Image (cartoon, rainbow, N blue to C red):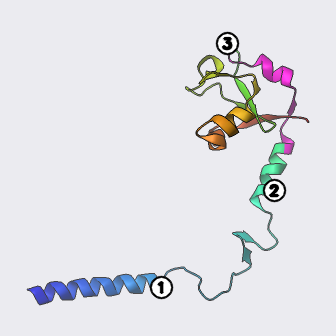
Amino acid sequence: MKKRSVLMILLALLMVLVLVACGNGNDNGDDNGVENGVENGAEDPADDDEAAEEELPVMTMAEVAENDGLDGARAYVVVEGIVYDVTDSPRWVDGNHNGNQAGQDLTDEILGDSPHGRSVLDRFEPIGRIEE
């Protein structure tokens, strides 16, 4: 009985090794025209982000300030020149989040003071940009 169990374990290990060896890994040094995760000749996704930001409507800080989340107004915040609408976030009740009021540039607070940093902004669609 013990011999059979050992044989089954060895057979299972052999199958795992075969599957790993036959995987889709590319260990022959040929990158198939891919460099840094981007096909040669293809555009870098970061370029798409920059192009998308340039297509955003230009807003003024006065327009952002009107959208402070108070008295039924939308709640807009600016981070690194991009305007985000945080109105529907349960963490921005009446445009306030941890003592920060919407309607202003919160770049220093988001990038410097907040524990989550810029990553939280991925939850919100950019709606505009501030022309500098």
Secondary element type, mark 3:
loop
Residue at 65% from the left image edge and 24% from the top image edge? 87
Q: Amino acid at mark 3?
A: Gly
- Tag 2, which secondary structure? helix
Q: Position of residue 23 (x, y in %)?
A: 49, 81
Range of residues picked out in magenta: 54-70
Above or below, 55 relative to 102: below
Distance from disc 3 to disc 1, alpha carbons, whole Å, reads 59 Å
Q: Residue at x 39, y 85 (%)?
A: 17
Q: Which residue is mark 3?
A: 72
Neighbor class of circle 1 (other Cα within 10 Å; few <14, some 14-19, many 20+) is few
**For residue 22, which numbered disc appears in the image?**
1
Crowding at label 3, few (<14), some or many (≥20) Cα neighbours within 10 Å? few
SS type, badge 1: loop
Q: Residues within 10 Å of mark 2 (few under 14, many from 20)?
A: few
- Describe residue 120's horizontal placement relative to residue 10 as left or right: right
Inspect the image, locate mark 1, and give the three-letter code of the amino acid beneath it. Answer: Cys
Which residue is label 2 attached to?
A: 47
Residue 79 among those drawn in magenta: no
Residue at horizontal 73%, vertical 30%? 106
Circle nearer the viewer, 2 or 1: 2
Q: Position of residue 66 (x, y in %)?
A: 79, 17
Disc number for residue 40: none
